[in-house]
Image (spheres, rainbow, N blue to C red):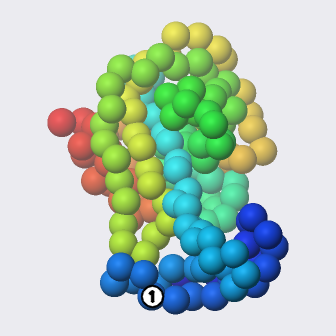
Amino acid sequence: MSAIKYCSSCASEMILKPFENTNRFFCTDCDRMEFIDPKVVTGVLFTINSEVVLVQRNLEPQRGKWTFPAGFVDRGEKVENAAIREVFEETGFIVELDKLVGVYSQEDDPIILIVYSGHIVGGVRTDNSEVQSIQTFPLDKLPVLAFDRDRKIIQDWNN
């Protein structure tokens, strides 16, 4: 569990103490309880000529490996809008979302990943500093994927 050092209300020191069968951060002065929020990520799976579009990561973790276009949702941003924005930022394509593929999370991982299927409605392929390459792959010839969960997500999308 990441530490919260100072209270967001009064800036006093935070300490861990038991609350309802778990440890929570509490302010030593005003007794405010703080939560460590998860990080919400969204992504989109889509095809060109019946092949899945993947991006080769240019950032850590897993730099050089392949995944579908995805990224963090900004505070106050609608998840669906973030998914469309991330595809555009990473590929130059404008997509329309078709349906929710799934919501994915793992114990002890702060990432909650929300994945959609979509289709291209515009834009042109554009290079981006976040990705080394944008390519399409047949589902039976996927490259080395960046994250363990990616193969299952692609299978869920393809079913």
Query: Disc 1 marks which amino acid?
Result: Pro
Q: Is residue 80 above or below residue 17?
A: above
Residue 132 in the image: above or below residue 144 = above
Q: Would residue 70 be seen by someone viewing this image from the given angle?
A: yes
Circle 1: element type: strand
Image quadrant containing the C terminus:
top left
Image location of residue 148, percent across then percent down: 38, 64
Q: Residue furthest front?
A: 30
Residue at 40% from the left image edge and 40% from the top image edge: 115
Say if residue 52 shows up in the picture: no
> Toward which corner of the image does residue 51 lie, by quadrant?
top left
Left-right relation of 78 to 141: right
Considering depth in this image, is 17 or 2 the residue closer to the camera? Answer: 17
Q: Viewer-proximal residue, 110 or 12?
A: 12
Q: Which residue position is annotated with label 1?
A: 18
Residue 117 or 50: which is nearer the viewer? 117
Q: Quadrant of residue 81?
A: top right
Tell me if 159 is positioned left or right of 1 in this view: left
> How many numbered callouts?
1
Which residue is the extreme one toward the right? Answer: 11
Image location of residue 11, percent across then percent down: 81, 73
Q: Residue furthest top?
A: 121
Q: Where is residue 119 in the image (x, y as percent from the top left)?
A: 43, 19
Identified at 47% across, 17% down, the residue is 96
Q: How crowded is mark 1: few (under 14 residues within 10 Å), some or many (20 or more)?
A: few
**Residue 10 vertical position relative to residue 27 in the rendered view, above or below:** above
**Where residue 54 sits in the image (x, y, percent)?**
50, 41
Residue at 74% x, 34% y: name it.
127
Q: Nearer the viewer, residue 110 or 44?
A: 110
